[in-house]
Image (cartoon, helix red, strand yellow):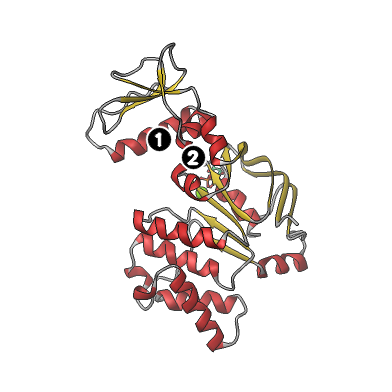
Amino acid sequence: MNSVRIEDAVKRFGSTRALDGVSLEASEGITGLLGPNGAGKTTLLKVLATVMSLDSGSIEIFGRDPSRHRHRLDIRRRLGYMPQEPGFHRSFTAFEFIDYVAILKEMTDRKARHAEVDRVIALTGLEKVAHKKIKALSGGMRRRVALSQALLGDPRLLILDEPTAGLDPEQRLRFREVMSRLGEERSILLSTHQTEDVAALCPRVIVMNHGKMLFEGTPKDLREVARGSVWFSEARAPEARLSWRTGEGVHRNIGTAPPGANLVDPSVEDGYLLLLGDEAFIEAAWRRSRQCAGRPWFTGRYR
Ligand SMILES: Nc1ncnc2c1ncn2[C@@H]1O[C@H](COP(=O)(O)OP(=O)(O)O)[C@@H](O)[C@H]1O
Ligand SMILES: [Mg+2]
């Protein structure tokens, strides 16, 4: 049975349609939601985590309807949620905070609960800082505290909003390891704006923008979107929508390739950028500008 089924979901904030007719189903495995800021990812995950209701459309989680009180309780008992901005009690230690959430999750037996808290702390590699105050932890470690509390009780459905934001490369690898193991028997829905995450981790990708789903498929399918549209050149290609100088000194161009272009195998990011068009180009350009600050790298043409 599908863990999650959502149909024609609409959620408005004033005149903004944060969700504009989203339909999706998810069962076991990892589904990655990819999209730029403001795409509607957090709104969709909040709805699935039963912390927000829809204006219209229908939703079913484990065959239950979250708008019904009894069903909602049932869903929440089987759900782990890592919000994008968790409200930490900053003077708690990591252990105390996770233990506090465990109490809210109805784990009443102290000994068993502490064992479970220790388990999720070990899973996310927080042993060494478990007894430090949250306010003294780095951003990446706080993300891991947020992830730990979502893993309490080994929920069947995990909803993770930007779980890799602020993680360094080593932490990111560790996260992938933990997730790929968990994803084998659970449904995991995670959001990210990093194509590397979905390429490395998610057998299924959904690309969103402006509250709509633009794409659904495997990372390979997403890569194929850009086949024939990525090429290298010595100089900047005027016909490219996005062009930057790579570390090897040649230009990588994305757009409508000119005849005879030196086409290359596309990446997942190329597919994503082509699919989203200008806005994603601007965001990617901004990211690249931070990666190669001070280098003459970008000749973006937004059209
Ligand atoms: N509580 C809110 N009040 C007003 N607008 C909101 C609220 N939450 C989200 N939005 C708007 O809805 C859109 C989608 O936001 P969000 O779901 O946070 O996107 P994402 O997580 O993909 O960045 C954005 O335009 C955002 O400004
Ligand atoms: Mg978000």
Quadrant for residue 209, please give it: top right
Disc 2 under 8 Å from ligand 1? The reply is yes
C-alpha distance separating marks 1 and 2? 9 Å
Compare marks 1 and 2 and give the one earlier in the sequence. Answer: 2
Quadrant for residue 50, please give it: bottom right
Instruction: Give the residue type at disc 1.
Output: Ala
Q: Is residue 19 visible from the viewing direction of this image?
A: yes
Residue at image coords 42%, 35%: 283
> Which of the numbered marks, if any, corresponds to residue 284?
1
Q: Position of residue 125 (x, y in %)?
A: 40, 69
Of residue 56 and residue 144, the one placed in the foreground of this image is: 144
250 sits left or right of 72 in the view: left
Residue at image coords 47%, 78%: 118
User: Compared with residue 12, is residue 232 higher up or lower down, i.e. above or below?
Assistant: above
Q: Which residue is mark 2?
A: 36
Task: Bin the neighbour count of mark 1 within 10 Å (Cα to Cα): few under 14, some 14-19, many 20 and up.
Answer: some
Secondary structure under tag 2 reads loop
Q: Position of residue 188 (x, y in %)?
A: 59, 57
Residue at image coords 49%, 40%: 36
Q: Does the CB distance between marks 1 and 2 fall below 8 Å?
A: no
Instruction: Give the residue type at disc 2.
Output: Pro
Disc 1 under 8 Å from ligand 1? The reply is no
